[in-house]
Amino acid sequence: MTFKEYKGLDLVSVGNEVLDRWKKNHAFEKSLEVREGAPEFIFFEGPPSANGKPGIHHVMARSIKDAICRFKTQSGYKVNRRAGWDTHGLPVEIGVEKKLGIHKDDIGTKISVEEYNKTCRSEVMKYTAEWVNMTERVGYWVDMNDPYITYDNRYIETLWYLLKKIYDKGLLYKGYSIQPYSPSDGTGLSSHELNQPGCYKDVTDTTATVQFEVIKDGKSQPLFGTEAFPVYFLAWTTTPWTLPSNTALCVGPKYEYVRVLSFNPYTGKEAIYVLAKDLVSAWFNPKAADIPLENYKPGDKLVPFKVLDGSFKGTDLVGIRYKQLIPWFKPIEEGEPFRVISGDYVTTEDGTGIVHIAPTFGADDKKVAANFGVPGMMVLDKDGKRQAQVDHDGRFYPIEDLDPEYVRTHVDPSYKEYSGRYVKNAFDDSLPADAPTLDVDLCMMMKEDGRVFRIQKQTHSYPHSWRTDKPVLYYPLDAWFIKTTAVKDEMVALNKTITWKPESTGTGRFGQWLENIQDWNLSRSRFWGTPLPIWRTEDGKEEICIGTIAQLYAEIDKAVEAGFMTSNPFKDNGFDPKDMSKENYDKIDLHRPYVDNIFLVSPSGKKMTRETDLIDVWFDSGAMPYAQEGLRNLGSPKFGCTADFIAEGVDQTRGWFYTLHAIHTMISGTPAYKTVISNGLVLDKNGNKMSKRLGNAVDPFEELDKYGADALRWYMLTNAQPWDNLKFDEAGVDEVRRKFFGTLYNTYSFFALYANVDGFDPKVAKVEYSKRPEIDRWIISLLNSLKKKVVASYEDYDITTAGRLIQDFVCDDLSNWYVRL
């Protein structure tokens, strides 16, 4: 027997030889065949989106999955590994809009929904070849010939089936509430989307502490006392653009409030200011406390003040009325606005102890205002519908989009100057970087006539869209929700049965998230995605949730009989509801606009129209334990089974990990997975997040071309524990190539050279261990110990320790000691 001798260490060419041999011999397929009948180790592959190129972080995730799945295969298990593609949602739509040079508002006008979705379908698999190439080159064994695809009709039907199950349990409902809304995406977002890593960013905004003038009457008289000065409530806000929608001020019921006689620092006018006693020193400089009021001259840096006698509990202030701060609109909602209310969430940690309330732009604001019968500030659009003062593009409602009669009777002419202004400059791509913000202009307006007490810059954390990286607003939305709060206790209990790597993610980031979950905002006001399968009558009193295509087929037939449909489009296309084959399902399309053109008949004989919303794309991926099998496998053990193992990046903790867990809990009452590795972020060598914009992104294909898959994988798996952030340094990959693989190469070359010279044949009977030299027995003993430790590490899903043990054995015990001695 001759052992192959290499002329030099070339991991790239060796890796290519191995890949070619695997492909030629169908190694992956045979690894499954030889395990036929063996116990199964169930693995779920999270679906990436193929409309973007793979990055270096995908090499990390795929290496982790491959290492565990190979180990389990070598341990005697059959490990099916099916790839998947996430094909719906904002990433695709935003890419298509850029390609076509259109905006969401153009869909249905400049381009039909049918044409738009056709483009989305073609674009979504744009980089499939790159993904397949990267996957094969890093040696990740996964079936990419039969992937589950989320836009497939059979996949969508299964999502409908699950939603029907959730609906039947009373967990799917329509509600009106304040939700995260992204003007740049044109849709609402769920709370778990808003909690993706990096969504909250530190931004520096203009903040305002404004003066709300108290109306003098019997209730407010104690605030005026014997002084002949106007009285103002001071309230601080980081979002001055919400001030025109103010309808209440909220105080803490147990806090103590005082009156402070001082001067407006901008106008120099004397007035009485009301704020929390504990916060006086935050707004009035203690150094000015001893300066006589009569010595003050407008423009002085130190503004004198005097805390007047007496104090008031928050409850004493409730009901006091004040003048509308920015009287652009007359209220049209029922209730009494512009008065003081109370709420337990008010704190004295910052601000003034008095909170500005705009019920249309904050969930807490809406809730506390409703408790006191305070309405939100709504406007009337040209269709006669009541809307928040900011439109869905993130602008103060343009006057031309409002009802003309409403404008004439309820809108002050001074609003015209601000009509159509974007509340955040990021929403208007035409604005230069140094353009003044709406917040600044509003503050300057109030500064001129003494309505603002202090204007300052403040750095604070603010939510941004996980896709467009632009600010998110909290906005009143009519949407469909999944009542996840109803199954919170079950989700918390099931989470305790899951083995998390690291454990701290399960108890901390994920566990704490479950303890504070909110109902899942399922609705998306978009075009390319899974349609919500609910049809309703115009008055909303009758509705039906469709769970299968067969059910929809039958309901369409009823609608045809009732005269609401001329024919059944499924029947027209030759679709057979009893045939579960892909060929049959490819005859129809369950996307918009086709499902929008289907009308059903209610039990009372009324026409029912589909709710136009799509569902959250995270429901698509979270339902894959069921949907990858499809209803053709309904009732089989594989339909909705629990995975033994999954692995993705930490950014999926409140994404895929969460939606898998939530759906599995609601549908099956079992965990979706038993063990999960949540790997950290792959950063640049300086610890910064990689991005094309910063020019620090690493191209995985270039690394594979230069170092090969073995060195790249070994570096990423052994440099740090997978759940720690990896500061990717190409020098580290080269070091692994030289020190570990170089040592392994030199050791093998030494062996091959002398084995070939001596004609060594491993098939010849071995020398008994007891008769071998001590050094041989020593290295064999270490090798057996190594096997036990490596297996134990893999059983504990500790890939890093397993790799380091092997590396230490090769570099120290085998090379430095055994070979050299």
Image (spheres, rainbow, N blue to C red):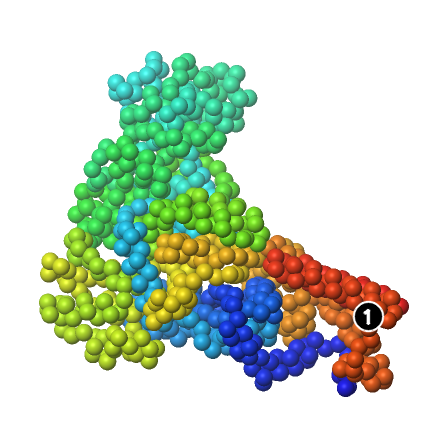
Q: Position of residue 278 (x, y in %)?
A: 47, 23
Question: Is there any visible trace of residue 335 in the rendered image?
Answer: yes
Tell me the kind of residue under disc 1: Tyr
The residue that appears at 56% across and 82% down in the rendered structure is: 26
Depth order, front residue of 268/624: 624
The one of 470 and 314 positioned closer to us in this rendering:
314
Count how many numbered circles sit on residues in the image: 1
Q: Position of residue 5 (x, y in %)?
A: 78, 82
111 on left or right of 782: left
Residue at coordinates 45% horizontally, 76% vertically from top-left? Answer: 146
Q: Secondary structure at mark 1?
A: helix
The quarter of the image holding the C terminus is bottom right
Residue 305: image x %, image y %? 47, 20
Residue at 56% x, 48% y is 504
Q: Position of residue 517 (x, y in %)?
A: 41, 46
| Residue in the foreground of this view, choosing between 804 and 229 | 804
Query: What quarter of the picture does the N terminus occupy?
Result: bottom right
Residue at 82% across, 75% down: 767
Q: Give the quarter of the image for residue 642.
A: bottom left
Q: Nearer the viewer, residue 76 or 179?
A: 76
| Residue at which label 1 appears | 769
Is residue 732 visible in the rendered image? The answer is: no
Q: Is residue 351 above or below residue 595?
A: above
Neighbour class for label 1 at 10 Å: few (<14), some, many (≥20)?
few
Is the residue 584 above or below the residue 676 in the image?
A: below
